[in-house]
């Protein structure tokens, strides 16, 4: 029976959790839409600007962005074209492969990021009020869910500890050989700059 069937949902915790996550995904979409409308951009264009702002140029090529956002290269290229027309990004040709280019923000693009990335604030403020043990449990479950979805091939790019060559389980504890330290649940990363695929 469907989790959207109210009778099942109200008598089954798994269904309630999934329905709750689905409702949260609506909230993220609505908050992002509001900001996108203010700047006459689409939600994906805002997401691209924010991603480009915080990632190295080797991750801001069209092919990487397509993988990151689970979209096709033509879809990303269309968004990039609009962002370039609006003078929010600049393309830099790769000297080792002149057919490829990476993307960086212009000063105007950085300003738009500053004005839009706070779309997430209502959720951040609620999370900030939770106590630390609850946050750790929440994080453990969210990171497990992300890894589970990645294993099913639903999310393509995951720079998480669990997929990293520096990660191991030592005496039932998470360990990073690069940082040479034990990782507590709250140290597990889902977007690590030092990540290398196992
Ligand atoms: S390098 Fe980063 S992703 Fe890899 S195990 Fe260490 S902290 Fe995790």
Image (cartoon, helix red, strand yellow):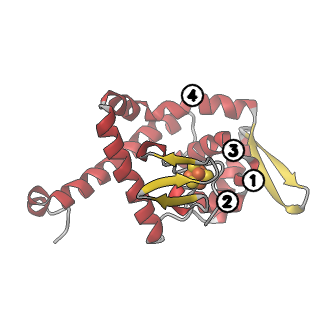
Give the CA distance from mark 4 to mark 1.
25 Å
Marks 1 and 2: in contact by CB < 8 Å? Answer: yes
The residue that disc 4 covers is: 115
Give the CA distance from mark 2 to mark 1.
8 Å
In the image, residue 163 sits, relative to residue 49, either above or below, namely below
Give the CA distance from mark 4 to mark 3.
16 Å
The residue that disc 2 covers is: 64
Q: Position of residue 93 (x, y in %)?
A: 86, 53
N-term mark: 3 or 1: 1
* Residue 61 appears left or right of 94: left
Q: Give residue 108's quadrant in the image.
A: top right
Q: Element at badge 4?
A: helix
The residue that disc 3 covers is: 83
Badge 2 residue CB within 8 Å of ligand 1:
no
Q: Position of residue 155 (x, y in %)?
A: 49, 63
Disc nearest the viewer among 3 and 2? 2
Disc 1 residue crowd, few under 14, some 14–19, many 20+, Cα 10 Å: few
Disc 4 residue crowd, few under 14, some 14–19, many 20+, Cα 10 Å: few
Q: Position of residue 23 (x, y in %)?
A: 29, 49
Q: Residue at x 73, y 56 (%)?
A: 61
Between residue 87 and residue 53, name the one nearer to us: 53
N-term mark: 2 or 1: 1
N-term mark: 2 or 4: 2
Q: Element at badge 3?
A: helix
Disc nearest the viewer among 3 and 1? 1
């Amino acid at each position: 029976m469907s989790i959207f069937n109210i009778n099942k949902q109200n008598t089954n915790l798994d269904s309630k959790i999934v329905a709750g996550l689905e409702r949260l995904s609506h909230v993220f979409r609505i908050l992002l839409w509001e900001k996108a409308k203010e700047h006459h951009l689409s939600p994906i264009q805002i997401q691209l600007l924010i991603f480009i702002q915080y990632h190295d140029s080797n991750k801001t090529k069209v092919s990487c962005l397509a993988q990151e956002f689970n979209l096709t290269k033509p879809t990303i290229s269309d968004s990039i074209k609009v962002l370039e027309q609006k003078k929010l990004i600049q393309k830099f040709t790769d000297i080792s492969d002149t057919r490829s280019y990476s993307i960086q923000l212009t000063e105007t693009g950085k300003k738009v990021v500053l004005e839009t990335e706070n779309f997430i604030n209502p959720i951040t403020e609620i999370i900030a009020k939770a106590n630390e043990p609850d946050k750790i449990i929440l994080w453990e479950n969210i990171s497990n869910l992300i890894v589970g979805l990645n294993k099913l091939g639903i999310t393509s790019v995951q720079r998480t500890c669990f997929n990293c060559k520096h990660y191991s389980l030592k005496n039932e504890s998470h360990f990073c050989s690069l940082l040479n330290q034990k990782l507590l649940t709250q140290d597990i990363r889902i977007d690590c700059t030092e990540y290398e695929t196992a």
